[in-house]
Image (cartoon, rainbow, N blue to C red):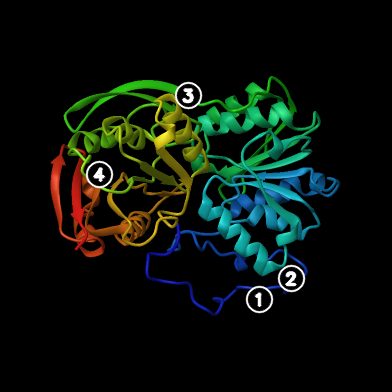
Amino acid sequence: MTAPHGTSPPEDPPPGDVPPGDVPSGAFPFDALRRRPDVEAPGLVASDAADRLLLDESASVRAGVPAGRLVVIGDTHGALALAAAHDGATDVRVHQDALTGERALAANAERLGLAAHVRPLPLTAGLVRDARVVLLRLPRALDALDDIAGLVAAHAAPDVVVYAGGRVKHMSTAMNDVLRRFFGRLDVTHARQKSRVLVAREPHDGRDPAPATGDDSVRVAGLEIDLRLRAFGGVFAGARLDHGTRLLLAALPDLSHLDGPLVDLACGTGAVAAALALRHPSARVHASDQSAAAVASARETVIANGVADRVEIVRDDALSTLADASVSFVALNPPFHAGAAVTDRIAPRLFADAARALRPGGELWCVWNSPLGYRPVLERLVGPTRQVARDPRFTVTVSTRP
C-alpha cells in the first residue's frame, strides 16, 4: 500500500538505491529494490532468499529463452522480473495481483533502467501464451495456485518449465498436489536459506480460471438480502460471507438518504458492495481493491446479483480515484497481510484515505478483529468513534469526520 495520506517519499534515494538510468553491471543489485509505494516497515523486504533461489535454479534454462517467452507471476516488487531482465531477458511478461506491487516494480524498473524490458499483464491467456519458462512465487492460497497452474498448462508452450518457489514455512505438500494435477513431472529442489523450488514440466489438462460460486443471506438495515457470491482463487473468504463482514452488514442503518456513492473500500469479493446496492435500489456504489483477483471477483459478484449497472468497481490503491470530501459513507473490513507477512501498517493507511475522501459529517463503518484495538487509531485519523456492535471476535465501529 502507499504511505499514509499526507506523507511523501523522501526526495533523495535511501542508501542502496541506484539513480535513474544508471544500470549496474555485474550481479543484480537486490539491495537497490524498494517496496514503495507498498507498505515499508522493519521486517518487510522487497526481495528474499526464495527470489534468489528461483533465479539460480532457473538460470541455465532462462539463458536460452527467446524474447517474450519468459513469464513471471507473483513477483512481489520486481526481484524476479528485473533480475531476469538484468541477465538479458527481454519482453518479460509479468503479473502481480497487488497494484502496489505492480507500481513498485515499475518504479524499481525505471530506477534501474530496465523499464523497457518488462510488461505487466492480467492473469489471462495472453500472459502465458507460448511461454517457455515461468517463474512463480507460490501464493499463500491453494485455490490461487490452482488458477495459475491451470492457466499455464492451458496456454504455455508444451515444453514449458515452471519454477515455483517460496519460503519453506509458507509451503505445503498440498502445493505439490495442485501442480501434479496440471503437470506430468514435478521435481523438488534442495532447500536453501529456508527456501525451496518446485519444478513442473509436461503440462496437461489446463483450463482458464473460473470463479467459485456460493449463495448466502444476510440482514442489512432490517431487510433480509439474498447474496450470490463469486470468488477467484486467493481472494479473502472465497465464495462465502465471512463472519466479520456479516456482523458489519447487520449493523448498518438505512443509508437511502445519503447523497453520492456508497463506498466499499478493500471490497474483496464485492459482498458489501452488492448488499448495499440490493438494499438501496436507487443508490450508486463505488467499490475498490488493490487486488486484481478481488476486483475480478467483485465484478462477477455484482453481475450475479443483477446490480452491475449501479456498482463501479476499480482496482485502486485505497480510494485514490475519489476526490477529497466527496462521499458520505465508507464501509471497510481492513486486511492485515502484506503478502505472507502480518502487519499493522495497512489498516491505518486505509483509515487515513477514507478520512480524506469523506465529507464533514461523513462516516467510516469499520469491522476489525477486537484484539487489534483500532479505536484509538480511528479516533486520531478519522474522528470521533463509537462502537455499534461486538461479539467474541469482532468489533464494528463508526467514525465521523469532523
Local crowd at mark 3 within 10 Å, few (<14), some, or many (≥20)?
A: some
Q: Quadrant of residue 132?
A: top right
> Tag 3 or tag 4, which sits nearer the N-term?
3
Distance from the alpha carbon under mark 1 to that under mark 3: 45 Å
Mark 2 or 3: in front is 3
Distance from the alpha carbon under mark 4 to that under mark 2: 46 Å
Distance from the alpha carbon under mark 1 to that under mark 2: 8 Å
Local crowd at mark 2 within 10 Å, few (<14), some, or many (≥20)?
A: some
- Quadrant occupied by the N terminus: bottom left
What element does badge 2 sit on?
loop
Mark 1 or 3: in front is 3
Q: Position of residue 75 (x, y in %)?
A: 60, 49
Distance from the alpha carbon under mark 2 to that under mark 3: 44 Å
> Tag 2 or tag 4, which sits nearer the N-term?
2
Q: Which mark is residue 19?
A: 1
Q: Are marks 1 and 3 in contact (CB under 8 Å)?
A: no
256 left or right, relative to 117? left
Local crowd at mark 1 within 10 Å, few (<14), some, or many (≥20)?
A: some
Residue 197 sits above or below residue 88 on the image: above
Distance from the alpha carbon under mark 4 to that under mark 3: 25 Å
Which residue appears at 23% of the width and 58% of the height?
378
Q: Which residue is disc 3 drawn over?
A: 212
Q: Which residue is disc 2 drawn over?
A: 23
Local crowd at mark 4 within 10 Å, few (<14), some, or many (≥20)?
A: many
What element does badge 1 sit on?
loop
Which residue appears at 37% of the width and 70% of the height?
6
What element does badge 3 sit on?
strand
Q: Position of residue 342 (x, y in %)?
A: 39, 50
Q: Quadrant of residue 128?
A: top right
Q: Which is more toward the observer, 370 or 283?
A: 283
Q: Which residue is disc 4 drawn over?
A: 367
